[in-house]
Image (tube, rainbow, N blue to C red):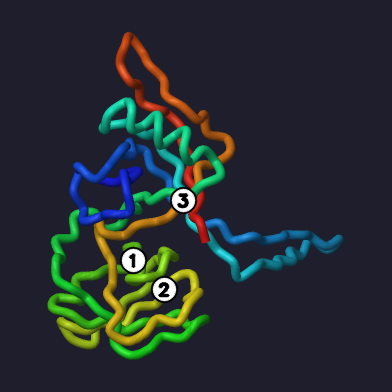
Amino acid sequence: MYGILKSTTNTGLLSELLCVFVAPIMVISNRPSSITETLSLKRKVSFSNAQRWEIQSAILPIGSERDFMIHSAEHGIFSPFPVRMPQTANSKNTLTNTLNTFGTAITGSDTVTINGTNASLLLAGEFINFSGLQKVYLIKNVTINNSNSITVQILPNLLNTVNSNTAIKYGKNVTMMAYSDPSNIIGIQYVDGKLAQIDKFGLIEAI
């Protein structure tokens, strides 16, 4: 399951979650752009290379009420916290092997070579990130070199240089640092004496 983590520890266990996402879950790629139309109705689009992920979902607290209240009060909308990134494209991927980058991928590149047993099980549409780096990337395309080596095209382009033999985080191990959307209601809600699901909750990637 996916949701807000209690801490930066993320090994994929349910017990590590403070809240879980409840469907429907929307993952949005936010890339600032400006669109204008000329008098001849031609469209002109300008955009920034900056990009961040945003999540909109209902959330259901599964930890203690005290922990959720403390988390809400501590972070508010001004302090980022760890979130287990939802894998909407391949949530049942059974890959459990260690995967690492092969060769150095420089800042601005959109391709990374990944080696490891059964690396070819990674699919386009999955989210990954790199050990020691915060940014989350989406796999756009996978070229299979062999069953244990793939070259992936990612979105957005790399914000940082990734050294060879850097561990890949995938599946339930992908952590996104996020801010609470300013439109969120910060706090807890009870219905009939029970901690209630929050029907609309937004998260903004910290980059």
| Residue position for label 3 | 178
- For numbered disc 1, what is the local secondary structure? strand
In 3D space, how far apart are the residues under numbered discs 3 and 1 (Cα atoms)? 15 Å
- Relative to 135, does residue 15 appear above or below in the rendering? above
**Which residue is farthest top?**
192
For label 1, the residue is 128
* 3D distance between C-alphas at marks 3 and 2: 20 Å
Instruction: Work out which quarter of the rendered image holds the N terminus and state it.
Output: top left
- Mark 3–mark 1 contact, CB under 8 Å? no
The single residue placed furthest to the right in the displayed view is 39
> Is residue 88 in view from this perspective?
no
Asked if the residue under mark 2 is in contact with the one under mark 3, i.e. CB atoms within 8 Å, the reply is no
User: Which numbered disc flags the more N-terminal residue, 1 or 2?
Assistant: 1
Determine which quarter of the picture holds residue 101.
Answer: bottom left
Q: Nearer the viewer, mark 1 or mark 2?
A: 1
Quarter-of-image position of residue 148: bottom left
Q: Nearer the viewer, mark 3 or mark 1?
A: 3
Report crowding for label 1: few under 14, some 14 to 19, many 20 or more residues within 10 A (C-alpha).
many
Tag 3: amino acid: Ala
Q: Which of 45 and 25 is in front in this view?
A: 25
Q: What element carries label 3?
A: strand
Residue under label 2: 154
Is the residue under label 2 in contact with that under label 1 (CB below 8 Å)? yes
Query: Which residue is found at the position 36% from the left and 74% from the top?
Result: 141
State the image coordinates of residue 140 (x, y, percent, origin top left). Answer: 39, 70
At which x and y percent is residue 8?
A: 32, 54
Q: Where is residue 103 in the image (x, y as percent from the top left)?
A: 33, 90
Disc 2 on helix, strand or loop?
Answer: strand
